[in-house]
Amino acid sequence: MASKTLVQVIAELRSHGPARLRRADRTPEVAPLIARLLAPCRTLAVEERASGLAFRLQGITEHAVEFSLTCVLHHAPGAGALTTAEQAVADLLCEGRTLAQIAHLRGVSANTVKSQVRQIFRKLNVDSRVALVRRLCP
């Protein structure tokens, strides 16, 4: 297998797109690319932010060209604010389940699920299931 240049690795990562990189089933094919990209790097700085952890890396490509890269690992917005029950409901919403299905699976009334969904939307500052999925789901 021919070795890839840094430019090829970055291009391949970009081709996956952000939505595809988040999906767990893509991890096996993306992880080696990220590892290859970061292998020659050294850490210049690490900073903890409210939204996550930021770090700056510096390295050199196969063609002796220096580069620096800033990465930010974001926390899922508001994910820590959900109760255990709300997180379970949010996970089922991410799977595309209906309120009736969620109520049946959780052994509660549909009204309880509706209330939990309202609380989830309020806590995460979203107004639709689509917005919830974009913000919280892999």
Image (spheres, rainbow, N blue to C red):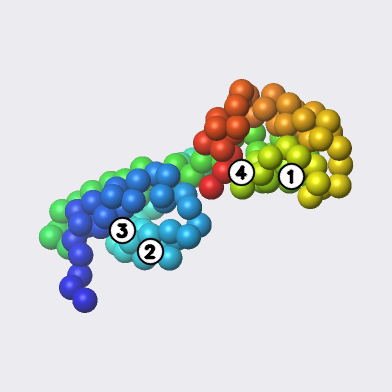
Query: Which of the labelled discs sits on residue 37, or is there none?
Result: 3
Give coordinates of residue 97: x percent, y percent.
66, 44
Identify residue type, mark 4: Gly
Amino acid at circle 2: Glu
Q: Earlier in the sequence, mark 4 or mark 2?
A: 2
What residue sits right under mark 4 in the picture? 96
Residue visible at 36% across and 43% down? 70
What amino acid is found at the position of numbered circle 1 in the picture?
Answer: Gln
Marking on residue 49: none
Q: Which residue is mark 1?
A: 101
Which of the two labelled residues, at mark 3 and mark 1, occupies the earlier sequence position?
3
Labels 4 and 1 touching (C-beta < 8 A): no
Residue depth check, mark 3 versus mark 1: number of the one nearer the observer: 1
Give the spatial CA distance, label 3 vs label 1: 43 Å
State the CA–CA distance, disc 3 to disc 2.
14 Å
> What is the total number of numbered labels drawn onto the structure image?
4
